Every structure is written in structure tokens, then in C-alpha cells.
Amino acid sequence: MAASSLVARSPAAFSRLGAELEKLRSAGLYREFTPCSYIAHDRGHAMHDGRRIQVWCTNDYLGMSQHPEVMEAQITSTVEHGVGNGGSRNIAGTSETHARLERELAEWHGKERALVFNSGYVANFETLSVLLKALPDTVVLSDELNHRSLIEGIRATKNTRHVFAHSDLAALEELLAGYPLERPKLIVFESVYSMDGDIAPIREICDLAERYNALTYLDETHAIGVNGPTGAGICEEIGEHRATFVQGVFGKAVGTTGGYVAGPDDALDYVRSHAPGFIFTTTIPRSSLDATVRSLDIIGGDTGRLLRKTLRENADRMRAELARRDIDFITAPTHLVPIIVPGGERVKQVSRRLLDEFGIYVQPVNYPSVAKGSERFRVTVQPFRTPEQIEGFAEALHTCLAAT
């Protein structure tokens, strides 16, 4: 792509935006990106500014994005079908793999229908906003730590809504009890909350939903592929199948791209027919979905079970190494290892030192993703990590914390 010799200046109308950006920089809240080119044959590593570095903050929990069979599935499909689908789902963009994958996802979660979207964010936003606008009398009860995609989907409507304290069953029940049984209600929550790595009381929330005649919308984003006998999430793991809607993604443990919602046929057919973010956008290429199908096949079998077991063992090993060095972390019942480094500026300094001095990349997480004073690293310890690498990470972090 040829570059123009002329560079357009930012219009004066945007000067206020520049001032707002400067406020973010002054507050230490300006987001910095670290470009990485992952190395498929050297998993867990990437190239950054000409250097080979280790990446410890990816959401590719099982390393499936670089699994040889998954890559081969995408390459083979690309050669056969091309690099794109050429249209929206409505106009020449629905491949046979779209149809197959939606059938298999519905069966996986024991639901009538599933709908594939371009991302997990779009899946949540479009499904919630479209359904709630169609059902304006529905009261929404949302966990206070829900992902921004859930929050924005709810905010896009005029429905009455309440935010309840995180996983607080008493607070949720009090809100539910404040409405007649016949009033439509929807409880929106996640199974695994990624910043703390905790698990919601899913069964108890479903009990409350039954008692007070409410529907439930459960985001299983961080559990798909990682939890359950076949990787279908926490609901599969605990044998709880009452959630009305289950949302999941391909861009984390599955290792590809896209998201989906599984649930009642009429509801999701309505979303399919009315959601702008589903109808008026070019769809995911078939080659990516063929890779997704292969990845899900692997995740659901013996290899997937071994990957999940090793992922948990590595997370436990990392916690032990951190504890041995008195590094503060949240003991979570999941594969996620949140390491607390209070102070927005300090967490960024530690991150920069790790990258510059040890070739270790871990992204700082600060406000508004987490509360001020609880800044952190969200570390993932993929199944292919060795004990030596885990110990090396902990020791490098200990050195950087002591020097910062």
C-alpha cells in the first residue's frame, strides 16, 4: 500500500479530544500497545522490536491458536475456499461451516439454537440489546463485575435495570423479590470473572431464577474450552443446564476468532432477524470457522482433557512459586493467576522492566478495568510451559518488584 507524501493535520474541532488524551496520559491511564508477532513453532514466544520475548498474558489458554492440526485446518480451507466469505450472513456469507458449527454448538450446550457472531463482544451486545428492546417490560439484574459488552448491551435499552453486588445472592434475591412473579426478569452474569479468577454461584442463581420466574443470561467466555469434561464450561462441569442463554467465544481457549450465543430457538431467531451487528457486517471467513471446528473437536477429546489438566497444574505451580517469594496474588479456583501490583504507575513500571530486562511481556491491568489500588497482572500459564519457565518468570517478577 503506497504511502501519501502529504499528512493531513488533525482538524481544530478535535483539539478537545487531544486535551482529554493528555489527561489520560497524566493520570497514567493511557493505554499502550505492545506489538507481538507470535512464533507458531516456539509456543509462548513472540517477536517484539526484533527481540524474541515470552508472552504470559495471552487469552489463548490452551495454545490452540498454534496447534498444528488447527493451523492445518485453516490453511487447507483457505486454499480450497479463499481468505474471505465475500458478504454478510444474509448475502452470500453463510458457509456450510457456519450452519454446521451453529448446530454443534447448540447440541454442545443442550440448547435449541446457537448463533455465531464476529466476536464475543458483538454476541453479547447484539443479543441483549435486541431482545431487551423487543421485551421492554423485562427488568434486568446485572452483576456489578460484568464485562463491558454485557453492560453496554443493557445500557443500549430503556429497560429498568439494577446492578447487584458481585455474586451476592442475598442482594440479588432482594431485588427479585421486589417485583411480581409475572413481571419478566433477566439475570445477567458470568461464570468465570477474569480479573479475580472467581466462579459465580451458578446453581444458586438458577435456583433464584426458578423461584422468582426469571430468565438467565450466562457469559461463559473464560470457561469455554477450559472447564467441563468436553470443555463446554462451568455449567457442564457442575451439571447445571438451566441457564436460558449461554454465551461463549472462540478467541480465547479455542484459539481462533468469533463468539456465539446458545439458547431458545424463537429468541435467537429474532436476534438473527433483527440484530444490526449480525446482519450488516461481513462474516467470519469459512477458513477460520473450519479451524474452530477442528479446535473444538480436539478440545472435546482426550487431548483436550490432558491440556485442561496440565493448565491447572501449571497454574498451581505458578502460585507456589509466587508464594515462595512472598508475591501477592489472588488464590483463584480457576486457571487464572491475578498478581496484585498496587499503583497505576508502578504496575506499568514493573511491566516495562520485565520486558526490557528479562524479555517477559505481561500486560498491566489498571483502572477502569480494576479498581484503583488493585492494579494487577493477569497471568496465564499455558499447558506447554515448563517448570523452568514458570520459576524463571516468578524470579524475574520478584526482582522487578523489589527494584520498583
Image (cartoon, helix red, strand yellow):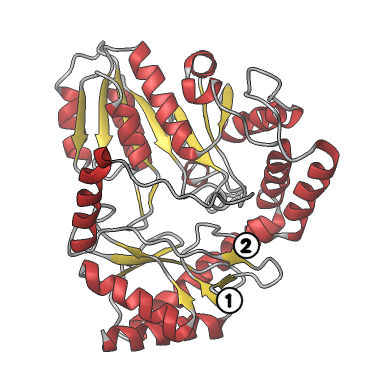
Q: Is residue 34 above or below residue 395?
A: above
Q: Is residue 184 above or below residue 40?
A: above
Q: Which residue is mark 1?
A: 50
Residue indicated by mark 2: 307
The residue drawn where x is 28% and y is 16% is 138
Disc 1 residue type? Gly
Instruction: Name the spot of residue 261 as percent of width and height, x first.
Output: 51, 30
Quadrant where the C terminus sits is bottom left
Taking depth in this image into account, of 81 and 116 the one nearest to the observer is: 81
- Work out whether residue 251 or residue 4 is closer to the camera in this orientation and state it: 4
Q: Residues within 10 Å of mark 2 (few under 14, many from 20)?
A: many
- Residue at left 23%, top 63%? 28
| Marks 2 and 1, the one that precedes in the sequence | 1
The reply to whether residue 355 is in sight is: yes
Q: Residues within 10 Å of mark 1 (few under 14, many from 20)?
A: few
Location of residue 400 by image quarter: bottom left
Q: Position of residue 44 (x, y in %)?
A: 58, 70
Name the side, left or right, on which 83 lies relative to 43: right
Q: Residue furthest right?
A: 80
Q: Could you say where residue 166 lies in the image, as x and y percent from the top left? A: 23, 45
Q: Say how many tags the image has.
A: 2
Q: Amino acid at mark 2?
A: Leu
Coordinates of residue 320 in the picture (x, y in percent): 40, 80
